[in-house]
Image (cartoon, rainbow, N blue to C red):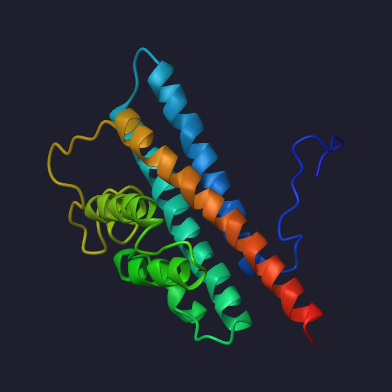
Amino acid sequence: MGKSFHGNVVLNFRKDSLSEFGAYAEAYHEAGKLLVCRLDESEGYSDIQACPIVFLYRHALELYIKGIIIDGNNILSLLGKTPVVDTNDLGKHDLLPLIPAIKQVFTAIGWLTENKGTKEVEEVVEIIKCFNGLDSNSFSFRYPVNKKGLSILSENFILNVVEFAKKADPVFDLLDGAIVGLSEEWQTRADNAYENN
């Protein structure tokens, strides 16, 4: 550590790392947005600059989804219901199997009914499927080859990163709002449970 405090950061200060998924997701998303903005404003750029951008967005999505499930499990536990996914099973990177869990969380707390929330959940599912098509296991934009030494992306793979980010950003903002909402929902329900005991 140098003489200046500027640039120092403090991580893991909440003493509950499971509650930090949303904060981490937002940080990865913000970093990705900065790189997209830089690429968009540049007169020239290297194609390979897309890799860290898509990785940051994909990782942010994974963290948002897992954060929603973790926070949702906390609320379900408070309600005496079974968790939608065991947190020990969240170590995998494939996001498609987590779609039902997100729907269960939103349904259990009343955010998803026949009359409300379906459009938003459909947008989330669409972006998950989009990312899954690009990078189902979070390898495609971190490494040029898979574990067998074979190319992960198809030859001459094309992606407009700026348009891709414009499509993803509003959904990520929705997911960020869900994380905040779940935290508030848990606090309200925990307060009510405490007062009723």
Q: Position of residue 132 (x, y in %)?
A: 27, 56
Name the quarter where the N terminus is drawn. Answer: top right
Instruction: List the single residue furthest toward the right.
Output: 3
Q: Nearer the viewer, residue 4 or 191?
A: 191
How many numbered marks are there? Answer: 0
Q: Nearer the viewer, residue 173 or 30?
A: 173
Instruction: List the single residue furthest toward the left.
Output: 155
Q: What residue is drawn where x is 26% and y is 55%?
A: 129
Q: Position of residue 10 (x, y in %)?
A: 76, 51
Q: Nearer the viewer, residue 148 or 26?
A: 26
Above or below: residue 9 compared with residue 4: below
Q: Is residue 52 left or right of residue 136?
A: right
Above or below: residue 111 compared with residue 192: above
Above or below: residue 153 compared with residue 146: above
Q: Is residue 136 left or right of residue 80?
A: left
Q: Is residue 126 left or right of residue 73?
A: left
Instruction: List the single residue furthest toward the front.
Output: 115
Name the quarter where the C terminus is drawn. Answer: bottom right
Q: What residue is drawn where x is 27% and y is 48%?
A: 144
Above or below: residue 68 compared with residue 176: below
Q: Position of residue 135 (x, y in %)?
A: 28, 54
**Residue 163 figure quarter:** top left
**Residue 171 figure quarter:** top left
Q: What residue is drawn where x is 51% and y is 63%?
A: 68
Q: Is residue 78 left or right of residue 84?
A: right
